[in-house]
Image (tube, helix red, strand yellow):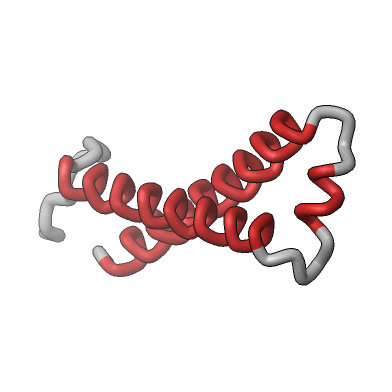
Amino acid sequence: MPPKKSSAVVSPALLLELACHTIMGTALGLGFAFVLTEVDAFGISSLIAHSLDPHMTFVVFVGTFTLAFAVGATLTGFVFTMTQER
């Protein structure tokens, strides 16, 4: 008889690992967005400064990068965790 598989209940260790990946992605996204806005190598900060509402443009720019990195790191962490448990 094959061994009994665990139920599909989400374990606290999995949630903690996913939270760590989310925090890591958020920090990386914030850092990357702030570097892009402070170092004017690509002209992003001058584009933001000349927009109609620079504060809101800055918030949307940083928020987009932060969200993209956080979601990407969370999904990557989920895939790594699921393949590691096999």
Front residue of this view, candidates 45 and 77: 45
Front residue of this view, candidates 21 and 43: 43
| Above or below, 61 relative to 78 | above
At x 53% / y 54%, what residue is drawn? 29
Side of 7 relative to 73 (left or right): left
Side of 64 relative to 12 (left or right): right
Whether residue 74 can be seen here: no
| Above or below, 19 relative to 37 | above
Side of 31 relative to 84 (left or right): right
Image quarter of the N terminus = bottom left
Side of 21 relative to 59 (left or right): left
| Above or below, 15 relative to 28 | above
| Above or below, 53 relative to 1 | above
Image quarter of the C terminus = bottom left
At x 17% / y 48%, what residue is drawn? 13
At x 43% / y 54%, what residue is drawn? 27
Residue 42: x %, y % from top left: 81, 67
Residue 24: x %, y % from top left: 38, 56
Whether residue 61 can be seen here: yes
At x 34% / y 59%, what residue is drawn? 82
Front residue of this view, candidates 3 and 33: 33
> Where is residue 12, by image quadrant?
top left
> Where is residue 55, by image quadrant?
top right
Number of numbered tags placed on the structure image? 0
